[in-house]
Amino acid sequence: MNNTQELTTTYHQEPQADVLAVIAQANLAESSKRKYAGAMGLYLFTGGNPFDAANLREYASGLGESSKAHLKAAVRLYSGAMLDAMNNHADPLAENAIELEARMAQTTRKVIALQNAVKVKSTKGQATHIWLSQTQVKALLDTCAGDGLKAERDRLALGLLVAAGLRRSEACDLEFTDVKLQPSGERMRTVLAICGKGGKHRTVPISDNLANAIDRWGKHVGHAGKVLRSINQRGDELGESLSTVGLFDLVRVKGALIGKPDLACHDLRRTFAQLGYDAGDDTTVLEFGLGFGNYGE
């Protein structure tokens, strides 16, 4: 059994101890940890399985909004820890890379199902999150129609967010040296070597269409340095990099064109995860088209 299997299996051997331990070790105020552990402890006391989304959903339906919020926070903590364990200990270049990738995708879908199991009503003043449908994703990409540098850069920037699930800072920090090839069965596939939050490293497989778009863009910028670049107002001069503020503004402008003026970069990351989960294919969460069948064609 490899490290990934061991870590995943451990969560299922003693779920009560492991789930509560994750909450206890979280970097949170003690008062918050008590509330989250209390909500989860009551659920476990009823015999609830913390890894059963349907069971969680049924139990949560009878709770008040405050209890639901605490339970949801607890679920996010331990389900997120499951995903971190997979990402931090998986070796994408191992001989069993295909099997490992399928297992990672399966775990990712399970995490999304758990986190969606407990629904909490938004309170007044709370930010509303946005998830796009595949039709809306296509419409968003279509706002980048054209042959100019800016159109190509904008489409690629959106692609890194919605077809690879990168965070805003990860997309802006991505360099051409982070775009790598790895064996996958009888062929080679393109992956992105990402250093994410807290310095954690992970490997993100991407579709051939997105990989080809990065390669085409590289011909404009020399396949060196940062992938995403700023562009002057005339659209004929490239800078050395695109700032996170610049990417935020780009997404807001494009979102407004499809009737989503409050669209944020993280909404595209959520969309990536949700559409992958909805598709239900073992490898979809990590590599799916999201309507990119015509990407760059």
Image: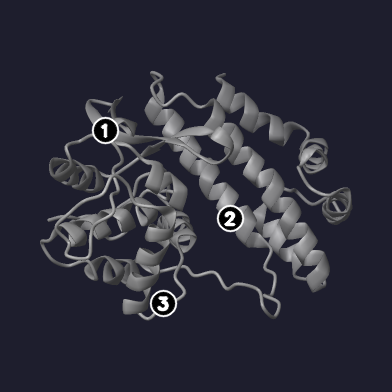
Q: Earlier in the sequence, mark 2 or mark 1?
A: 2
From the viewer's perspective, tell me whether residue 173 is left or right of residue 159.
Answer: right
Residue tagged 3: 260
In front: mark 3 or mark 1?
Answer: 3
Disc ID at residue 189: 1
Residue type for callout 2:
Ala
Residue tagged 2: 113
Dot 2 alpha-carbon crowd within 10 angstroms: few under 14, some 14 to 19, many 20 or more: some
Q: In percent of the image, x 14 and y 45: which residue is there?
A: 220
From the viewer's perspective, tell me whether residue 103 is left or right of residue 233.
Answer: right
Q: In percent of the image, x 31 and y 40: which residue is there?
A: 226
| Quadrant position of residue 18 | top right
Q: In percent of the image, x 13 and y 66: which residue is there?
A: 146
Q: Is residue 85 above or below residue 108?
A: above
Q: Secondary structure at mark 2?
A: helix
- Taking the image as drawn, is residue 24 in sight? yes
Q: Are marks 2 and 1 in contact (CB under 8 Å)?
A: no
Q: Earlier in the sequence, mark 3 or mark 2?
A: 2
Give the x, y percent position of residue 8.
62, 32
Dot 3 alpha-carbon crowd within 10 angstroms: few under 14, some 14 to 19, many 20 or more: some
From the viewer's perspective, tell me whether residue 254 is left or right of residue 261.
Answer: left
Distance from disc 3 to disc 2, alpha carbons, whole Å, reads 25 Å
